[in-house]
Image (cartoon, rainbow, N blue to C red):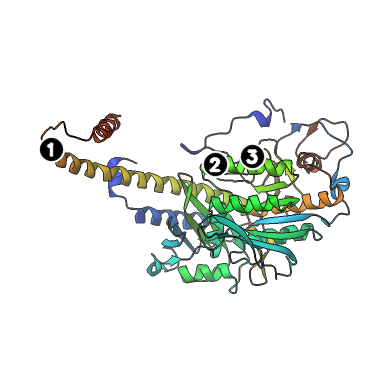
Amino acid sequence: MAVTEPQWRRRRPLQFPGLPAWSMPATAARSESFSISAFPGIDAEWAWGGADGSGVTVAVLDSGVDGTHELVAPIARGWQVASGDEGQLRLEECVPVDTAGHGTACAGIIRGIAPGAEISSVRVLTDGRFGSGSALLAGLDHAIDQGFDVINMSLSTTRPEFRPRLAELADRAYFRRCLLVVSAHNLPVESYPWNFSSVVSVASHDDDDPMTYYYNASPPVDFHARGARVPVPRPGGLQGRSTGNSFAAPHIAGICARILSKHPWLTPFQLKSVLYHCAANVVKEAGADVAGPR
Amino acid sequence: MSQDLADGVTERQLLQSIVEVARYVYGAAASSVFMVDPGTGELIFAAVTGSGGEQLIGTRFPAGTGIASWVVASCQPVIADDLDGSDQFARDAASSTGFVPSTIMAAPLIADGECIGVLEVLDRYSLTPPAPGRELHDMELLGLVAVQAALGLALLRRHERAGRPAERLESLVARWAGRPVSSAVDPLALTLLAASVDLLDRP
C-alpha cells in the first residue's frame, strides 16, 4: 500500500472534545507497510532461542502476586506499600499475596514465557484507595532501587501532577538498565507512564500465540502483544481467560527476560531495538527496506 | 446538553440509561455501574438492569476486590471469561446483581482525568452467542460506550456545580444589599471582592 506520510508523523486525532486521544484502537495493528533499516543478523533465534529467563530478575508492580499458585510460584520476594509513622509511604517486605488477582495474572503470563526468571512482587495496589499515584511512585522507586532487570507495569495513573516524578523515575530506570514494560491505554484519556519514550509500551493484538508480537509504527505504542483470551491464573488456584492491554505487557516482559538471559549486557535502548527487529511484522529477508503485514 | 433538558435529568436516570444501552448493545444478561467514593475508594453499586438486583443499589463494596477494582486500578477495560461459581469475580458480581455470571466485561468511567466509576457487562451475547475472536472488538466498543457515559456524567456534574453558585450568589447579594458604605472595610476583603466581580463579569 502506498504510504504518503510516515505513520510516526501523523497527527493523533481528537476523537472526543476535551479529551486528548493518546490512545489507539486495540485492534489496529499490522495493517500498513513501513520503511525500515534492518539488521539481518538479529532475529528471534538469535534473540531468545533456547533461553528461559534464567538469571534475570523481574518485578511485577501491581496488586501483589499469589505466591502459592502453581502457575506462578515461586515468587522470590514480596513487598507492599505501607504508611510510615508520619504518613509517608514506605515499602515493607511481606509474604506475596494478591486479593485482587490482577498481579497474579500478569506474573503467570511472565512465568509461562520465561519459566527460569526470578519473579518478585511489589504490591502498590492494596486495600486502600486504588489507583493512588503516590503508591505507584513509591513502589516504582523501590523496584528501581532493588536493581530489577525488568519491571512489568500493567497500570497507569491519569493524574497529571504525578507526570514529572514518573518521568524522572522512568529515566532513572532507563539509565540503570532497568527496563520498564508498561501496558498502553486504549481509551482516549491521557495517562502515564506508558507514553514515555524511555519505557516499552504494549497494546493488544488478536492472535493466540504468546510469542508473536508486532511493532507499531504509529507511536506512542511500541508493540502489540497477545492480549485477547489470554489464559491466566486466578486467585484461589483457579484459571481463566482474560482480555485487555494489562495482559499484553507481561508477554513482552517475559520475552525481554528471555532475551536478557541470553544477552545480559543489553541496555534498554539495545533491548528495544532487538524487540523491534524480531517483531513479526519486521522480520524479513535481508536487504529489503520495507516491512509490514505478513 | 440544553439548560431545559439538563434541569430535568438526574444522575440516577443517566446511569440507568447507560446500563440499559450497554446491556442492549451486547444482548447481555445484565449490566451495572459502580461509582467510586473519592474519599474511601469504596465502590458504590449505582445502577443495574437485567438481573433484579435493584434493591442492592447504594450498597458499598470495599476497595481492592472484584474485577471492578482491576479496572479502577489500571484505568483500562478488561474482560474475564471462563468464570465459574468458585471464582471470586463471579461471587463478587453475584453479591451485587443476584446471579453468578460466566463472563464479565468492565470499563472505567473517566471524567476530568479521574476514574469515577466502572461499567460492567455480565454474560454478553446471552441470547445469540457471537463468532469467536470478538474480544478486542467487544472491549473497544465498551470503551467507547464508557467514554460517552463518562462525558455525560461529567457534563451533568458540571451543570449541577454551575447551578449551586447561582443560588449562593443571590444570597450573597441579599446579604450585601443595604450595607452602609464604609471606609473601614478590610482592604484585603475589598481586593478579593474586586477580583470576584471581575471573575463574575467574564463572559
Question: Is residue B91 placed above or below B70 in the rendered structure?
Answer: below
Amino acid type assigned to the residue bearing label 2 in the image? Glu
Amino acid type assigned to the residue bearing label 1 in the image? Ala
Location of the N terminus of chain A by quadrant is top right
Camera-nearest residue between B91 and A161: A161
Chain label for disc 3: A
Q: Secondary structure at mark 3?
A: loop
> How many residues crowd around disc 1 within 10 Å: few (fewer than 14), some, or many (20 or more)?
few
Quarter of the image holding residue B51? Answer: bottom left
Identify the residue at image location x=62%, y=40%. A167
Q: Which residue is mark 1?
A: B177
CA–CA distance in space, label 3 to label 2: 12 Å
Identify the residue at image location x=82%, y=49%. A260
Residue A144 place in picture, x, y as percent: 69, 50
Residue A72 place in picture, x, y as percent: 73, 65
Q: Secondary structure at mark 2?
A: loop
> How many residues crowd around disc 2 within 10 Å: few (fewer than 14), some, or many (20 or more)?
many
Identify the residue at image location x=17%, y=34%. B184
Mark 3 and mark 1 on one chain: no
Quarter of the image holding residue B195? Answer: top left
Q: Badges 3 and 1: C-beta atoms under 8 Å apart?
A: no
Numbered mark located on residue A196 in the image? 3
Q: Which residue is mark 2?
A: A190
Question: B17 left or right of B140?
Answer: left
Chain label for disc 2: A
Question: A261 left or right of A143?
Answer: right
Camera-nearest residue between B111 and A218: B111
